[in-house]
Image (cartoon, rainbow, N blue to C red):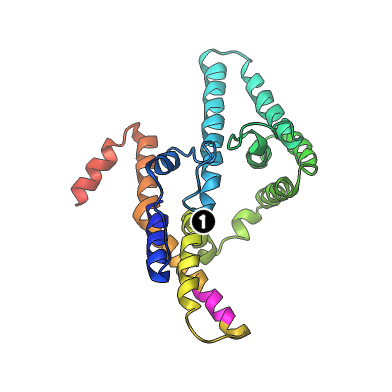
Amino acid sequence: MILAVALIAISGLVKHENFTLPDTSSVLSHLFYLQVILDKPEINSVYWTLTYEVQFYLFFVGAIVARFYLRHIFNTPLYIAIDIALFLCAISSALGFFKNVHPGLFFPLWSSFYIGVLAHTATLSKRKILAFIALFVAMLFNGEFSIVSAFTATFLLIAMTSGWAKSGMNWRWLQFLGGISYSLYLVHNPVTGAVSFVLNKIPLHGTIIDLLKLVMIVISSVIAAYIFWFVIEKKTHDVARSITATGSPTSWLKRKMRRE
């Protein structure tokens, strides 16, 4: 977000255009991923997805935790009710039953997230394959976004069950791009705008020149994404792994201090 705001300011100064920095309420809404729900202007056009992603994770992880407690702590078959509820929520989403909910709430897009979950679990359970097929069919009647999500999940399912996910994607450059893909998603929009503005100052035109400009934009975006990944995302992963292994970020901080 700081990068996006900085590029907005730099772009305005370079272009000699008036620009307005986001106000406090807009920044706070972005920090808590509420900007879509609160109808605040996006600092970066790709940030709208973060509002939904955080809700997906909170809802799904909460359901998994509840399922675990019901099954292993309280030793009750009621955990199956959570599986059914998640699936019915996805079917309802695919059939458009949530179209009139408040903008920014995750329910209308839940099917696009949950079919990805089923694509993974279907490799482990035949019952989940049937659920995957049912949700896939329902999503075919819910618009382009839903259709693309359904076929993407199908591609992933086929890749995993056939083994191609490991053998066919075992290229270092592809794995590198996969590793920085989330950072690339977050930074590509402001970087593309900034680099395009600079390149368009070059008084050369034509198909070859445009292709070279496109290559330079892609390379610049990948470089910026790698820097973002190395400086920010990689360190957050280190903290997350430390918490997973020890239950506390303290050990990670101690190791970091010893190395320094």
The residue depicted at 64 percent of the width and 42 percent of the height is: 116
In depth, the one of 30 and 183 nearer the eye is 30
What is the total number of numbered labels drawn onto the structure image?
A: 1
Q: Which residue is mark 1?
A: 185
Instruction: From the top left corner, tell me how far across and down residue 13 is, in percent.
Output: 37, 67
Residue closest to the eye, 135 or 38: 38
Element assignment for label 1: helix
Q: Position of residue 240 (x, y in %)?
A: 39, 40
| Magenta span contains residue 215 | yes
Name the residue at the front extreme.
18
Q: Amino acid at mark 1?
A: Tyr
249 left or right of 45 in image: left
Residue for point 32% across, 33% down = 248
Above or below, 9 relative to 132: below
Residue 132 occupies quadrant: top right
Q: Is residue 228 visible?
A: yes
Residue 92 % position (x, y): 73, 30
- Residue 114 shows in this picture: no
Q: Is residue 118 above or below residue 48?
A: above
Callout 1: few (<14), some (14-19), or many (20+) C-alpha neighbours within 10 Å? some
User: Which of the pair 80/42 is nearer the observer?
Assistant: 42
Q: Is residue 132 magenta?
A: no
Could you tell me what secondary structure mostly forms the magenta stretch?
helix
In the image: residue 206, left or right of residue 187: right
At x 80%, y 40%, the residue is: 137
Please provide percent x and percent y for residue 78. 63, 15
| Pick the front one: 26 or 20 | 20
* Image: magenta residue range: 210-216
Task: Name which residue lies at 80% across and 42% down.
Answer: 141
